[in-house]
Amino acid sequence: MTTEITSGVEVSINANYLAEKSQPDYLQFVFTYHVFIKNNNNFPVQLLRRKWVIQNGVGEVEIVEGDGVIGRQPILKPNENHEYISGAVLATPLGFMHGLYYFQHKETGAIFEVKIPQFKLEATEILN
């Protein structure tokens, strides 16, 4: 699991390769990633937007941006958690993801960025 804390918000990610959903002969490698977000601040925050940078094994980059995560914009009170599972399909058996979440301080209205730590997407069966 990869973890990073930015501005009091902790983001941890665990990625997995889904061999049963992948089709290596067609250059489709399917991955899931489980995201855990914890508000370590003493004030509530809301996750408003996300920006993902997805890079495959040959250096091709895709940027994915949008509101919230999985159709939600969760509000996290102090010490509350939010978790979700999402996925990515790469054309190579190895890649990386990282990005940013945009949060709002619910008491002041200030918007701030939280880093999504870089993590590896790796089809271990293919690479070994």
Image: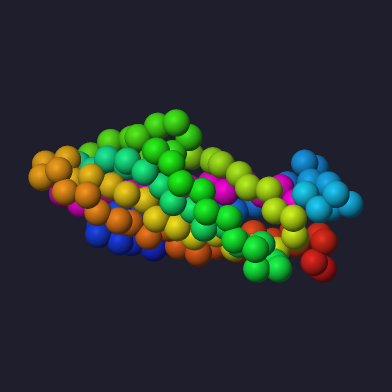
Q: Is residue 20 above or below residue 10?
A: above
What is the residue that sits farthest to the top in this orientation?
A: 71
Residue 3: x, y in percent?
43, 61
Is residue 64 rendered to the left or right of residue 101? right
Number of numbered markers: 0
45 falls in the magenta region: no
**Among the 4 quarters of the image, the one containing residue 7:** bottom left
Q: Residue at x 37, y 60 (%)?
A: 115
Q: Is residue 61 above or below residue 108?
A: below
Q: Is residue 59 above or below residue 66?
A: below
**Among the 4 quarters of the image, the one containing residue 56:** bottom right
Q: Quick check: can you spot residue 86?
A: yes
**Among the 4 quarters of the image, the one containing residue 15:** bottom right
37 falls in the magenta region: yes
| The C terminus: image quadrant | bottom right
Q: Residue at x 46, y 46 (%)?
A: 65
**What is the chief secondary structure element of the magenta stretch?**
strand
Q: Residue at x 32, y 42 (%)?
A: 47
Which residues are the magenta region?
29-43
Residue 9: x, y in percent?
30, 54
